Image (tube, rainbow, N blue to C red):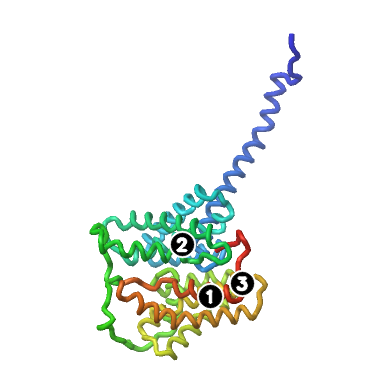
């Protein structure tokens, strides 16, 4: 007869009995880790729109969207999940997804489609836009090695989809996207300014939301993230509004926050997120960039009027790319936003 195992059947049962609770704890821990991973990556996707990897900030941003519309909140949440799944399939980069770098463009893309388009299949179009922005995010991150992608995938995806209604009857264009002839365009100064409203809407417009309450909740999330980023946000918003007023911008446009949100994003990007050493010079540099977004926003809005396309965050992207490239604040490979 061959040599048998030294562990009897009864001993094996005893070992299995002792191991079962430990194994159960491991399985439970794995499930908790997985659940925590998905939750954090989802909330980071919301906070990364303002270039922060902070789940508490992401939670306040989600609440800000929820205050405006529960439909917006649900669709944006599902869009993040779709984008993260696509990101995992294409990249297998767990840290990239957990940091929210796959989902933030999806959040903006789905909100833009819901706000600027109409039709019976709008939700499906929002999810399709999410998938397209996710593909663009992966593709552009493969090429943009030394500068951050920022919200460029969202911009390109949204502009392309906004042009669908011209040739595809299934999609309906909202009144906000109707092209205008520059020959008939007139400057409208508008009524008096409510500076408090303009300030909070400058923050909410980062997410294309026209809401003081959403702006207040998003600001609360930013305040949680730290003093430096909070200072960048508040100072840049106030400075951009004041600069727009001095330059003679339309009051109605300022009160809607349309001259503030690109300034905030630029100040955070240059003065905080890509200012790893915390240099005061970069903080000032970011504020200068924030001011530059004001005239750039005005000129780009005129450039896009004949096509009926909104400016979105293209002033922020252009100015941030220019400032980071000029200051040599370029990224190390693998550290991209």
Q: Position of residue 2 (x, y in %)?
A: 74, 11
Q: Which mark is residue 322?
A: 1
Residue under circle 2? 105
> How far apart are labels 3 and 2 at the CA level?
22 Å
Mark 3 neighbour class, 10 Å CA radius: few under 14, some 14 to 19, many 20 or more: some
> Is 277 or 209 nearer to us in this picture?
277
Q: Secondary structure at mark 2?
A: helix
Q: Position of residue 60 (x, y in %)?
A: 50, 66
Q: Secondary structure at mark 3?
A: loop
Residue extending furthest toward the top: 1
Nearer to us: label 1 or label 2: 1
Q: Secondary structure at mark 1?
A: helix
Nearer to us: label 3 or label 2: 3
Residue under circle 3? 329
> How far apart are labels 1 and 3 at the CA level?
10 Å
Which quadrant holds the N terminus?
top right
Q: Position of residue 328 (x, y in %)?
A: 62, 73
> How far apart are labels 1 and 2 at the CA level?
21 Å
Mark 1 or mark 2: whose residue is earlier in sequence: 2
Instruction: Decide: is 192 above or below 174.
Output: below
Q: Position of residue 317 (x, y in %)?
A: 48, 71
Mark 1 or mark 3: whose residue is earlier in sequence: 1
Mark 3 or mark 2: whose residue is earlier in sequence: 2
At x 42%, y 79%, the residue is 297
Kindly tell me whether residue 54 is visible in this rendering.
no
At x 40%, y 70%, the residue is 208
Question: Contact, CB < 8 Å: mark 1 with mark 3?
Answer: no
**In the image, 172: left or right of 108?**
left
Question: Contact, CB < 8 Å: mark 1 with mark 2?
Answer: no
Kindly tell me whether residue 88 is visible in this rendering.
yes
At x 76%, y 19%, the residue is 6
> Is 193 or 131 nearer to us in this picture?
131
């Amino acid at each position: 007869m061959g040599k048998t195992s030294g562990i009897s059947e009864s001993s094996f049962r005893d070992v299995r009995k002792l191991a079962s609770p430990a194994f159960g704890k491991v399985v439970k821990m794995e499930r908790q880790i997985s659940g925590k991973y998905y939750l954090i990556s989802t909330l980071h996707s919301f906070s990364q729109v303002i270039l922060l990897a902070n789940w508490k900030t992401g939670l306040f941003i989600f609440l800000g969207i929820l205050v405006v519309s529960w439909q917006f909140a649900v669709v944006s949440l599902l869009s993040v999940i779709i984008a993260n799944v696509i990101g995992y399939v294409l990249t297998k980069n767990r840290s990239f997804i957990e940091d929210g770098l796959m989902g933030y463009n999806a959040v903006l893309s789905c909100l833009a489609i819901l706000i600027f388009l109409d039709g019976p299949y709008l939700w499906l179009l929002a999810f399709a836009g999410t998938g397209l922005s996710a593909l663009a995010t992966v593709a552009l991150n493969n090429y943009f090695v030394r500068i951050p992608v920022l919200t460029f995938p969202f911009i390109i995806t949204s502009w392309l989809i906004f042009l669908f209604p011209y040739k595809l009857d299934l999609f309906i264009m909202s009144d906000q996207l109707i092209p205008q002839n520059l020959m008939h365009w007139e400057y409208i100064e508008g009524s008096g300014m409510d500076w408090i409203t303009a300030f909070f809407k400058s923050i909410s417009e980062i997410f294309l939301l026209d809401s003081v309450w959403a702006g207040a909740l998003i600001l609360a999330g930013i305040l949680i993230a730290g003093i430096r980023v909070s200072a960048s946000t508040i100072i840049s918003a106030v400075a951009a509004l004041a600069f727009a007023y001095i330059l003679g911008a339309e009051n109605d446009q300022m009160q809607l926050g349309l001259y503030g949100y690109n300034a905030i994003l630029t100040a955070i990007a240059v003065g905080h997120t890509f200012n790893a050493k915390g240099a005061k010079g970069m903080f000032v540099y970011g504020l200068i960039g924030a001011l530059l977004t004001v005239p750039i926003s005005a000129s780009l809005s005129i450039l896009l009027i004949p096509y009926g396309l909104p400016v979105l965050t293209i002033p922020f992207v252009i100015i941030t790319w220019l400032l980071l490239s000029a200051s040599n604040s370029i990224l190390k490979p693998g550290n991209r936003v």
